[in-house]
Amino acid sequence: MRFIDRVDAGRRLAERLGHLRGEHPVVLGLPRGGVPVAFEVAHALGAPLDVVLVRKLGVPYHRELGFGAIGEGGVRVIRDDIVRMSRVDEDDLAEVERAEEEELSRRAVQFREGRERVPLEGRTAIVVDDGIATGATAAAACQVVRAQGAARVVLAVPVAPPDAAAAFRGEVDELVCLSTPAAFSAVGEWYHDFTQTSDEEVVGLLRRNTENASGDDGGEAHGGPLRLPVDGGAVTLAGDLAMPAGAPGLVVFAHGSGSSRLSPRNRAVARALNDAGLGTLLFDLLTPLEEEDRANVFAVEPLARRLTEVTGWLRRRETVPVCYFGASTGAAAALWAAAEAGDGVAAVVSRGGRPDLAGDRLEEVRSPTLLIVGGHDNVVLDLNRQAAGRLRCENELAVVPLATHLFEEPGALDAVADLARDWFTRHLPTRQSPT
C-alpha cells in the first residue's frame, strides 16, 4: 500500500480509528512529519490535536546510542542498563539532559504559540507518526505519554516493517498500522509525495485544530471546515473557508498534483490574503480514493468542472466576487473554469502553474490573469511565456528572481503572496462601508 501524501495517509488512518471516537481521545502527532497525518485523524474524530515532544538522550561519545528520553512535564524514561554499560560520568549525562530539556522547551513554545499542553490524565491518547522505521522515537513517545497520565495509549501509523509492528503490539494498548510490507527500507518509499514538513506547517495545523474546536477565528474571520458536494451530490470534498468581515472578494484555491488543501505553500498565501481582508477557500479537488488513480490528478477538464461546481455552491452562500488561485496543474483547472465562467471570475493568479494544460481554453479566458513563475524554474517559465502570448485577456507575467518551482527560497513565497494580494485587490470592487 502506497500513500499519495501525509494527508491521504491520515484520512485512511482515520477510517481505521473511528471506533475510538466515543472515547473522546487526544490525538498526538510526532513532529514534524507525523503532524499532518495526525491533523486528519483529529479532524475526523473531532478530537483535540497536540504534539508529543520527545528528546532522545544520547551517550555523549556515541549520540546514536540512546540511554533514555525526556518529555514535557519532567517525564524521564531512562535505560539504566545502557547507563551502566556506557560508563560515562554522571555529570556528562546530566549535561546531555539539560541541553535536551532546553530544546524541548524551545520547541514547545514554538509549536504551540504559548498554548498549554493538552492534559492526558485519564484520557485515551492516540500517538500518530507518518511511519515507523526503527521505532525508537515512537516507543519513547508512547512511554512519555503513559508517564503523563494517559489511561490508554494507541499507536497509529500508516506503515511500518513487520518486526517493528510486532514489537509494538506488546508495548501499547492498541496498534493500528495500515501496512507492514516485508520489503521495507524507508518510510518515504511508501509515499508518492514525502516532502519534508516544515515547522510553520506544524504550527499552522495545531492552530487550525484549536480554532476549529473552539469556533474562535480571532474575531477576524468566519468559516471553518466544510463538506462540499460535487458531481450532483454523489461526491463530497473537504474544504476550509475563511471569510474576514467585510471581505471584498473570495479567493478559491486549486492545488497542484500530489498536493491537497493542506499545501503549506497555498496555506501561507491564504493567510496573507486573509490578513489583507480577503476571503479564501482551500479544498480538496479529489477524494482520497480518486487520488489513488494518478490519471485523475492530471485530468484538467473534470477538475475544472469540480471547481465550477464548488464556485456555484459558494455563490449561493457568499455574495462577494470570486477569484481563483491555481498552483501547478491546479492553475490549468482554474483557467479552464474561468474560461467557462466568462466574466464571472474577477481575477486569476497562477503560481508555478501549467497554463499550457488548459489548451485552447486559454484564448477564452476573460478574467484578468497573473502568471507568477520562479526565475530558476526554466521549463515552466518558458511554458508560461507561451501561455501569456495566447491569452486574450488582461494579463501579466511576474518572475520571482532566483526562485525555483516550489518557491522554497527565503522570501520567495512572501513575494508570491504580495503579488497575488495586489492583483486581486486591484481587480476587485471596493466594498462600501454601511452608513
Image (cartoon, rainbow, N blue to C red):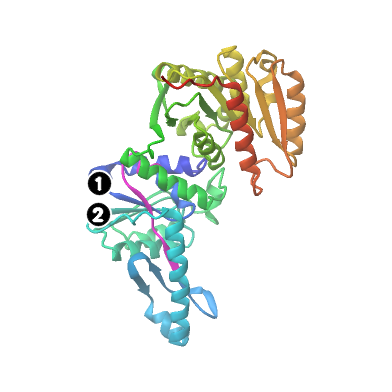
Q: Is residue 136 visible?
A: no
Left or right? Give the position of 266 relative to 127. Answer: right
Q: Position of residue 296 (x, y in %)?
A: 55, 27
User: Quarter of the image holding residue 304?
Assistant: top right
Please tell me whether residue 41 is drawn above or below residue 61 in the rendered image.
above
Q: Amino acid at mark 2?
A: Arg
Mark 2 surroundings within 10 Å by alpha-carbon count, few (fewer than 14), some (14 through 19), many (20 or more): some
Measuring 46% from the left and 30% from the top, which residue is drawn there? 287
Q: Is residue 398 visible?
A: yes
Measuring 41% from the left and 46% from the top, which residue is drawn there? 207
Q: Is residue 318 magenta?
A: no
Which residue in the protein does label 2 denote? 123
Measuring 45% from the left and 85% from the top, which residue is drawn there? 91
Magenta span of residues: 40-56
Query: CA separation, marks 2 and 1?
Result: 8 Å
Helix, strand or loop for disc 2:
loop
Q: Are marks 2 and 1 in contact (CB under 8 Å)?
A: yes
Please tell me whether residue 228 is drawn above or below residue 20 in the rendered image.
above
Quarter of the C terminus within the rendering: top left
Q: Position of residue 206 (x, y in %)?
A: 41, 48
User: Quarter of the image holding residue 392?
Assistant: top right
Q: Amino acid at mark 1?
A: His
Q: Earlier in the sequence, mark 2 or mark 1?
A: 1
Which residue in the protein does label 1 denote? 24
Please tell me whether residue 338 is drawn above or below residue 56 in the rendered image.
above
